[in-house]
Amino acid sequence: MTGFPQIWEFIDGFKLCCRLKGWRAYEHEDLVEAEGEHHSFVWMRKVHNNTFKRIIINPRCSVREGISYRIVNVSYMAWVLQEAPPETITRMVAERPRLSRRIAIYDLSEAYAGRPICSSLNETKSVVFQEFENFLTTEYHIELRPIYKLPPLPPELAPPQPETLGLSD
C-alpha cells in the first residue's frame, strides 16, 4: 500500500464510484441516494460518545438544492473514523439491533498508520456500504476485519439504557 489518501480525496473517489453505478452522490454532502434510500457518511478523525449519540438520535440531513435546502431522512449511516472509536460506541451499536440494522462503523486507523487493515461493524443491508467495502478492498487493498461483539461491560461502565436515549428496540 502506497499510503492512504487524504480524506477529501477518499470521499471524492468513492462518490465517483457511486455515480458510475447510477446512484446519486450529492455534491455538497457526504450522502448517497440509492434504491430510494439515503446513505450518509460521517467522516471524522475522532468521535466522542455524546457527539455520536446526538447525531444518531436525529437521522436527518439537510441537502443543498440551488440556493435553498431540504431535509431528507437518512436510512443508513456509516461512521468512517481515522482513530479507533471508543468501545462504548461499538458496543452500543453491536448490542442494539435497531442501531446495528442502520449504522455501520469503519475504523481506518490502521490504514492511516500504513497497514492495509480496516476494522468494521456493518450489519446493515445497505448496498452503498457494501460497495464502500468493495471500494476499500479493490482500490486500496484494505483487508476488512470485523469489530467483534464483546462481553457486556460492567454496570458502572455501561452506556445509558436505550429508553433514556430514545433508542429502545
Image: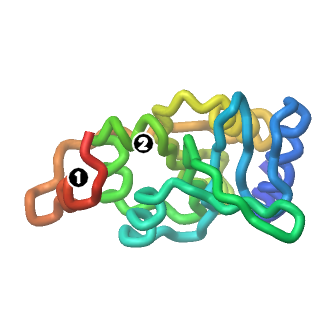
Relative vertical location of residue 80 with respect to residue 117 in this rendering, above or below? below
Q: In the drawing, does residue 85 fall left or right of residue 127? A: left
Comparing 69 with 10, the one in front is 69
Q: What element carries label 1?
A: helix
Q: Which numbered disc covers residue 86?
A: none
- Sequence-first tag of 2 and 1: 2
Q: What element carries label 2?
A: loop
Q: Which quadrant, please, contains the C terminus?
A: top left
Residue at horizontal 56%, vertical 56%?
60
Q: Give the residue pinned by disc 2.
A: 147
Q: In the drawing, does residue 127 fall left or right of residue 96? A: right
Relative vertical location of residue 133 with respect to residue 159 in this rendering, above or below? above
Residue at horizontal 37%, vertical 51%?
90
Res 89 → quadrant: bottom left
Q: What amino acid type should be assigned to the residue bearing mark 1?
A: Pro
Comparing 167 with 51, the one in front is 167
Residue 154 in the image: x percent, y percent? 10, 56
Q: What amino acid type should be assigned to the residue bearing mark 2?
A: Ile
Residue at horizontal 66%, vertical 29%?
127
Residue 95 in the image: x percent, y percent? 28, 41
Comparing 111 with 48, the one in front is 48
Res 134 → quadrant: top right
Residue 56 in the image: x percent, y percent? 45, 57
Res 22 → quadrant: top right
Q: Give the residue pinned by disc 1.
A: 162
Marks 2 and 1 sit apart, C-alpha to C-alpha, by 21 Å
Check if mark 2's residue and mark 1's residue have beta carbons within 8 Å: no
Q: In the drawing, does residue 25 fall left or right of residue 35? A: right
Q: Residues within 10 Å of mark 1 (few under 14, many from 20)?
A: few
Q: Is residue 137 visible?
A: no
